Amino acid sequence: MEAAFFDLDKTVIARSSTLAFSKPLYRAGFLGRRAVMRMGLAQLFYLLFGADEDQLTRARDELLHLIEGWQRADVESLVVETLDEVADPMVYAEALFLIDEHARQGREVYIVSASPEEIVRPIARHIGVTNVIATRVKTDAQGRYVAEIDVYAMGPGKAEAMRALAERTGIDLANSYAYSDSVTDLPMLEAVGNPVAVNPDKDLRREAEEREWPILEFQRPVSLGPAIPRPSPFAGIAVAASAVALGAAVILLKRRARQG
């Protein structure tokens, strides 16, 4: 069995999944104005410059202390209720095309993200993906968050989770695919036989060029509506260039496999 693993932020969607819900959290009384402003500035920095592992770790620790005491069920309900408002139009049409193509070819598709699973799982369902690997924050007996991580799907943690999944399910990682935009996901990309850089930051672009990995550019966020998306003639036009790039990438990977 083969699989395709997709990073979420800036790979499947055009921005940070966690920061995208700052406004709904503010309106619901979870966040104060100052916290929303800080998250907005962090989002701008993230979009312009990306984030290294140290920055993401600091952001994780700040978030843990921020959400301590929140009810897990309340957060997931809010995400589900506001998903249409927040997720449109930030999902890349090119990513939807690739997800559908991998599914058509019989591969299991996974969304892999350092964001909390309460945010990742509803977004994944919204785009028709049921399998996720995401960060899980610990809760107390009343279902309230505590400032501790149960599963941290960041950097090497993504690769570890993928290998553990492969052992449990029989996924052949050597013939599987992984897609990401960030050099912090290098372990995730190295865990599979078919790594692909998507909208890569400068460090990942350099690694991809040196290793002759395929590089794809996703540029068209689209609106999905409430239904699970499937390719349409309009979407086909929008992602034609990426489809060609994907075909070239697959040809390159097969050629390298024969040469190896």
Image (cartoon, rainbow, N blue to C red):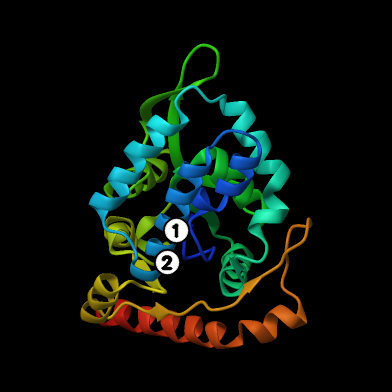
Mark 2 falls on what kind of element?
A: helix
Q: Report how far apart the C-alphas of labels 2 and 1 lie in the structure.
A: 6 Å
User: Residue at the top extreme?
Assistant: 141
> Residue 242, percent across and down?
53, 83
> Residue 222, percent across and down?
67, 71
Residue at 47% x, 50% y: name it: 37
Q: Residues within 10 Å of mark 1 (few under 14, many from 20)?
A: some
Q: Which numbered disc covers residue 60? A: none
Relative to residue 226, is residue 164 drawn left or right?
Answer: left
Label 2 with label 1: CB-CB less than 8 Å: yes
Residue at 32% x, 50% y: name it: 56
Residue ID for mark 1: 43
User: Residue at the left extreme?
Assistant: 210
Camera sees residue 123: yes
Above or below 92: residue 228: above
> Residue 101, percent across and down?
60, 70
**Amino acid of disc 1:** Gln
Depth order, front residue of 238/160: 238
Residue at 57% x, 24% y: name it: 71
Above or below 243: residue 19: above
Residue ID for mark 2: 47
Q: Examine the image and state in which quarter residue 42 appears.
A: bottom left
